[in-house]
Image (spheres, grey):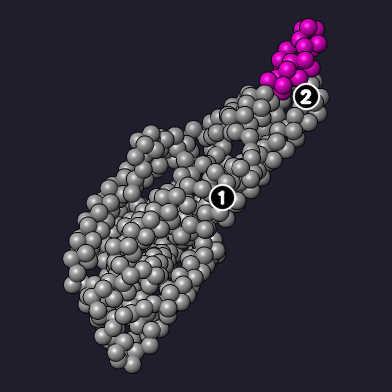
């Protein structure tokens, strides 16, 4: 019986004008989006490669102070799936050439936006009249004149609806991948292919949830137009309202100082105090007529002991700020799970390695690289000092033999782990709305 119901639901959907129009619109938007995203990715990849080459060239000959600043930060290659999924904007390891104001004013559409907004809306368009519409047409009464269980009918409608929606979703997804393989200047590894497959199934879970919402609303109303109105209101709440709350709640529950305040107090103020201490220690020797090299040699240990507490104070303040920002992000992320759209976006970005875990993964590698660089610079200073006794903080060093930063992409296992919690929330939403739809349909008057 279930196969017959699935077949009927599938044929009804495929033959409807809503399916044809929505399929054509989603496919057209996917095509335009694919070409634009790939062109932008290729351009950014060229800019990023040029920037990385110049970055490496500058590092060959710098003073230790300059290396210890922004030049020490390695540049992260663009995620390989960034051409289809924009993800979060990196905070560290991004060239200044990428700071374009236009995307901030007009954010680019990616496939998470297409799936999250258009496919969810398409799901509700297919399901809002799945029960109330057939009641109005008298089809339900004819169906239940035969020995058909309500649970069987509901499951058949659900599966038939998901199969119907999987057709345009699969077509758009495969089309985007095909265009990417032809026009994209990149070769995907097995990890990326597994991620694409995982994102596809994640999209089906997300689409299924909205289809079940439509079934639930349809099983609680008698008129299709009322079902449509309620479905649109729920869609707007899940898509437009709920995703805006996590950031606000994170700031309210875990307040943190502004980045500008931290920059002034921990960096600019630190430099002012450091130079004040250094000048105070060196002043007596300068009054006695010692040369700068002699003063540096005589005061080196005293200066280091005097400014060490400043370094510790700055490190503690930076660590506290970082912990507050992490806690704020965790609160916001946990709250975002209550939004199906946010859960889907979070899980998808983790699978595509364009999300939060990828940023953390890069930061861990960056910190290891910085430690290696600092040890290397210290060793080079000691070698130069042992050779001519003239090296100080402002001396240029030959760093051509320095350690090279090699970025290692996020393994697929870590992507799955990072996406597990938001995916679990989507599964729970599916179970919840299936139970609600089932209970509502059991009490539904088919007469």
Q: Secondary structure at mark 2?
A: helix
Q: Main secondary structure of the magenta part?
A: helix
Residue neighbourhood size for the residue with mark 2, other residues' Cα within 10 Å, grouped as few (<14), some (14–19), many (≥20)? some
> Are the residues flagged by discs 2 and 1 in contact, CB closer than 8 Å?
no
- The residue segment tinted magenta is 272-295
Q: Name the residue: 30% across, 67% down.
A: 223
Direction from residue 431 to residue 149 in the image, left or right: left
Q: Secondary structure at mark 1?
A: helix
In the foreground, 385 or 130: 130
- Whether 274 is among the magenta residues is yes
Q: Name the residue: 76% across, 22% down.
A: 297
* Residue 318 image position (x, y, % from top left): 67, 37
In the foreground, 184 or 87: 87
Camera sees residue 247: yes
Direction from residue 262 to residue 123 in the image, left or right: left
Disc number lying in front (2 or 1) = 1
Residue 332 numbered mark, or none: 1
* Residue 226 image position (x, y, % from top left): 32, 62
Q: Name the residue: 25% across, 54% down.
A: 29
Residue 404 numbered mark, or none: none
Residue 303 numbered mark, or none: 2
**Of pointers 2 and 1, the one earlier in the residue sequence:** 2
């Amino acid at each position: 019986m279930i196969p017959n119901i699935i077949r009927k639901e599938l044929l009804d959907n495929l033959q409807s004008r809503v399916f044809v129009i929505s399929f054509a619109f989603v496919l057209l938007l996917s095509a335009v989006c694919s070409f634009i995203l790939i062109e932008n990715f290729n351009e950014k990849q060229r800019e990023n490669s040029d920037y990385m080459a110049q970055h490496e060239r500058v590092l060959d000959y710098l003073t230790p102070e300059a290396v210890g600043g922004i030049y020490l930060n390695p540049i992260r290659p663009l995620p390989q799936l960034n051409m289809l999924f924009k993800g979060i904007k990196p905070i560290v390891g991004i060239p200044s050439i990428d700071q374009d104001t236009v995307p901030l004013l007009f954010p680019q559409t990616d496939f998470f936006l297409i799936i999250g907004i258009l496919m969810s809306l398409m799901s509700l368009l297919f399901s809002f009249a799945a029960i109330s519409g057939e009641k109005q047409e008298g089809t339900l009464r004819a169906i239940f004149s035969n020995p058909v269980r309500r649970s069987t009918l509901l499951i058949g409608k659900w599966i038939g609806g998901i199969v119907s929606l999987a057709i345009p979703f699969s077509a758009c997804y495969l089309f985007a991948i095909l265009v990417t393989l032809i026009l994209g200047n990149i070769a995907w590894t097995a990890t990326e292919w597994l991620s694409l497959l995982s994102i596809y199934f994640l999209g089906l879970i997300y689409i299924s949830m909205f289809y079940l919402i439509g079934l639930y609303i349809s099983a609680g109303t008698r008129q299709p137009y009322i079902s449509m109105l309620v479905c649109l209101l729920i869609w707007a709440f899940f898509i437009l309202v709920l995703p805006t709350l996590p950031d606000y709640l994170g700031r309210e529950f875990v307040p943190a100082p502004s980045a500008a305040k931290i920059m002034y107090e921990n960096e600019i103020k630190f430099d002012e105090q450091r130079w004040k201490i250094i000048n105070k220690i060196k002043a007596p020797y300068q009054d006695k007529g010692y040369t700068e090299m002699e003063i540096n040699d005589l005061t080196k240990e005293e200066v280091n002991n005097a400014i060490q507490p400043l370094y510790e104070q700055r490190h503690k303040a930076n660590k506290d700020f970082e912990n507050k920002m992490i806690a704020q992000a965790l609160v916001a992320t946990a709250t975002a799970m209550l939004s199906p759209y946010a859960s889907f976006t979070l899980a998808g970005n983790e699978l595509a390695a364009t999300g939060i875990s990828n940023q953390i993964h890069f930061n861990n590698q960056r910190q290891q690289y910085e430690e290696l660089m600092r040890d290397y610079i210290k060793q080079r200073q000691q070698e130069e000092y042992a050779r001519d006794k003239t090296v100080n903080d402002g001396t240029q060093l030959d760093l051509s033999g320095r350690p090279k930063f090699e970025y290692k992409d996020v393994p697929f296992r870590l992507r799955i782990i990072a996406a597990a919690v938001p995916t679990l929330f989507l599964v729970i939403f599916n179970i919840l709305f299936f139970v609600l739809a089932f209970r509502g349909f059991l009490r539904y008057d088919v007469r």
